[in-house]
Image (spheres, grey):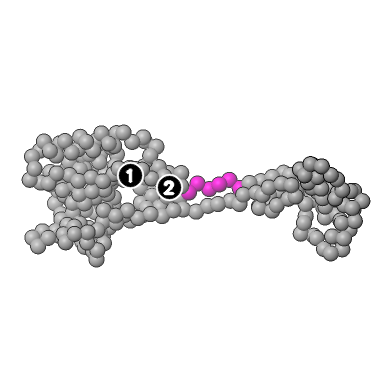
């Protein structure tokens, strides 16, 4: 299991491999018991993606599992597929690659000389449907000679930062001209802005205070948010950020 934190969202990615059809029922039961334990240990606030070879066919239609089967599967349902659907229903999960209408070559995950089936699946929480934009088999790429590459696209939006506003007065430095610059310089000299000795911090604070006082009178002031403009003796505001992060999971 892998834990990812993306844009303030915590995502748990679980890889699973169910026992093959020929193995006894006890092995299959133990597999789902172990998977149950893993999923139960994940907080409800975290998102889940389970991907793997479940060695079962969920069937072409939902047929009694409308809440977990999207109605776009492949083939006929078997016991292994029913076990997967029961598991998904118990944990309110959805089988992602049954939720998007696709052509056959984008549904079949296993193709041999004697059969073509759908046995590889992605599952996620029902409440997170909006994050998942697509899920399909990419026929041109094979992980092995028989298993096809199953791809799922998801989008996680980053939380928007609140726009910073300020009621503090801001000096209108944009009005600076050569004439006003000379006027400001003369006033600073008369105020003794550059005179002083001793502690460097005290000298800087005195000069900065004089500059703010004179500039406020010469250029004027205004109020409101001015983004990242820097003021003498102060910091800068942080600009608003927004956006989203897109990812692709493959099985």
Residue 45 image point, x, y percent: 39, 37
Q: Is residue 120 left or right of residue 26?
A: right
Q: Are marks 1 and 2 in contact (CB under 8 Å)?
A: no
Whether residue 203 appears in this view of the structure is yes
Q: Residue at the location (71% across, 46% down)?
A: 234
**Which image quadrant: the N terminus?**
top left
Q: Residue at the location (43% across, 47% down)?
A: 6
Q: Is residue 17 left or right of residue 205?
A: left
Q: Is residue 209 left or right of residue 149?
A: right
Residue 97 image point, x, y percent: 26, 52
SS under mark 1: strand
Give whichever of 44, 251 is nearer the camera. Answer: 251
Judge the density around disc 2: few (<14), some (14-19), many (≥20) Cα neighbours within 10 Å.
some
Whether residue 126 appears in this view of the structure is no
Residue 146 image point, x, y percent: 16, 59
Q: Residue at the location (85% across, 45% down)?
A: 196
- Disc 1 and disc 2: Cα gap in Å? 13 Å
Counting the numbered discs, the total is 2
Magenta region includes residue 100: no
Give whichever of 175, 94 is nearer the camera. Answer: 175
Magenta range: 158-163
Res 2 label:
1
Which picture quadrant has residue 184? bottom right
Residue under numbered circle 2: 6
Q: Is residue 99 above or below residue 198?
A: below
Q: Residue at the location (41% across, 44% down)?
A: 5
């Amino acid at each position: 299991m892998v834990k990812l934190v993306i844009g303030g969202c915590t995502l748990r990615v679980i890889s699973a491999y169910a026992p093959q059809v020929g193995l006894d029922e006890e092995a299959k039961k133990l597999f789902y018991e172990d998977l149950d334990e893993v999923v139960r240990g994940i907080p409800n606030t975290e998102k889940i993606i389970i991907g793997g070879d479940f060695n079962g066919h969920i069937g072409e239609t939902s047929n009694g599992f409308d809440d977990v089967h999207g109605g776009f599967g492949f083939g006929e349902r078997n016991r292994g597929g029913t076990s997967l659907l029961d598991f998904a229903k118990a944990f309110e999960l959805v089988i992602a690659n049954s939720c998007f209408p696709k052509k056959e070559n984008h549904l079949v995950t296993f193709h041999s000389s004697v059969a073509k089936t759908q046995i590889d699946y992605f599952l996620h929480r029902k409440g997170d449907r909006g994050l998942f934009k697509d899920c399909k088999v990419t026929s041109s790429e094979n992980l092995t000679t028989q298993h096809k590459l199953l791809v799922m696209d998801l989008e996680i939006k980053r939380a928007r930062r609140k726009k910073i506003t300020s009621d503090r007065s801001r000096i209108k430095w944009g009005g600076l001209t050569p004439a006003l610059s000379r006027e400001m310089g003369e006033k600073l000299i008369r105020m003794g802005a550059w005179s002083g000795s001793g502690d460097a911090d005290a000298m800087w604070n005195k000069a900065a205070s004089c500059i703010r006082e004179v500039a406020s009178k010469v250029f004027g002031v205004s109020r409101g948010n001015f983004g990242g403009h820097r003021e003498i003796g102060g910091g800068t505001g942080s600009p608003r950020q927004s956006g989203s992060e897109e990812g692709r999971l493959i099985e």
